[in-house]
Amino acid sequence: MATWEAERDRGERFEFGANWQRFLSCVDDQRLAAAADSLRRLLAVDSLAGRSLLDAGCGSGLSSLVARRLGARVCSFDYDPQSVACTMELRRRFQPDDPDWTVLPGSVLDQDFLAGLGRFDVVYSWGVLHHTGAMWQAIANVADLVGPGGLLALAIYNDQGLASAVWRRLKACYNRSGALLRWVILLATVAWFESRTAVKNVLTLHNPWPVRRWREYFRQRGMSQWHDYVDWAGGYPFEVAKPEELRDFLRPRGFELVGLETTSGLGCNQFLFQRRPQRQPEAS
């Protein structure tokens, strides 16, 4: 299997961790509160006390941190070494010497690595598996790590047909380009989304001022508008799926869809699946 460094050097993989390293300076109590609210809503819980949670592709480590603060025993891993470093930094900063939060380097496509993790009450992977280059295999792999009756929380890019295909080409171009062209693609991406949002908001009289929107963006999962734009422009590999495709893929693997939040655009659909409990053998 190719290393992260080799894929990056060939222009086949975006440096997600480098973007999250810059994001860490933004993390504060307001963002943590917003991220915790988002995680509670996605999982439909008030607390994770007594549960184990696997953060598959932990990125900045923000979701792992709030899961730990909600009471879960957390295992975090990521393929990108800088993302692993980000998560370890958040643990050092907010949960020093915490024995119930493990951070590991590893790939969701590495069967030997995954086999050593065990099973979890909650497996969480937000906006990650469509960046592996083998999305359906990655989904199957993380599903295998959910214990009986456990939860699988995923966010996967919505399939927008031609629009998704165009963005895939732009993302590939971004990662194979030098610094100047990357900036051109990034700024064009920001201009595209901002102009569309501005027109929509003016027409609907909804929060038309971009400064206010950017300032309040943290309320969406505690994230940063700018860092999310960088992630979108460069996020490659890039795959997409329709909601029904994911539902139909996981149903024969023992999962029922218990929560769904869809988007009409290019963002992520959010899914909450529950693994059917194993049947107890009938008494003879």
Image (spheres, rainbow, N blue to C red):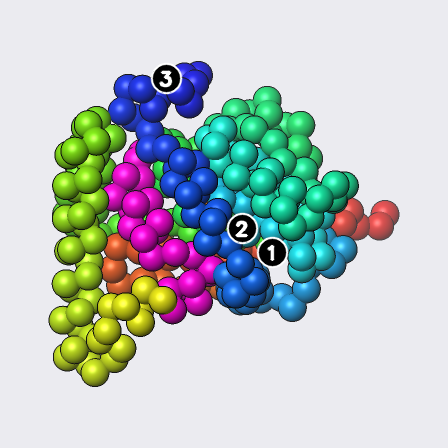
- Mark 1–mark 3 contact, CB under 8 Å? no
In the rendered image, which quarter contains the N terminus?
top left
**Seen in the image, is 162 located left or right of residue 119?**
left
Q: Quadrant of residue 48?
A: bottom right
Image spot of residue 95 (x, y percent):
69, 48
Q: Quadrant of residue 133?
A: top left
User: In whole angstroms, how far apart are the C-alphas of marks 2 and 3?
Assistant: 27 Å
Image spot of residue 19 (x, y percent):
38, 41
Image spot of residue 191 (x, y percent):
15, 55
Q: Amino acid at mark 3?
A: Ala
Q: Secondary structure at mark 2?
A: helix
**Could you tell me if residue 67 is visible in this image?**
yes
Q: Amino acid at mark 2?
A: Leu
Q: Secondary structure at mark 3?
A: helix
User: In whole angstroms, how far apart are the C-alphas of marks 1 and 3?
Assistant: 32 Å
- Mark 2–mark 1 contact, CB under 8 Å? yes
- In the rendered image, which residue does mark 3 sit on? 6
Q: Who's the residue at 67% across and 27% down the image?
A: 116
Could you classify mark 3 by the number of other residues whose Cα lies within 10 Å: few (under 14), some (14-19), or many (20 or more)? Answer: few
Q: Who's the residue at 67% across and 60% down the image?
A: 70
Image spot of residue 185 (x, y percent):
17, 42
222 in the magenta segment: yes
Residue furthest out toward the bottom: 205
* Viewer-proximal residue among 116 and 4: 4
Residue furthest out toward the right: 284
- In the rendered image, which residue does mark 1 sit on? 66
Q: Which residues are magenta?
A: 216-241
- In the rendered image, which residue does mark 2 sit on? 62
Labels 2 and 3: the sequence-earlier one:
3
Q: Amino acid at mark 1?
A: Val
The image shows residue 30, relative to residue 106, as above or below, that is below
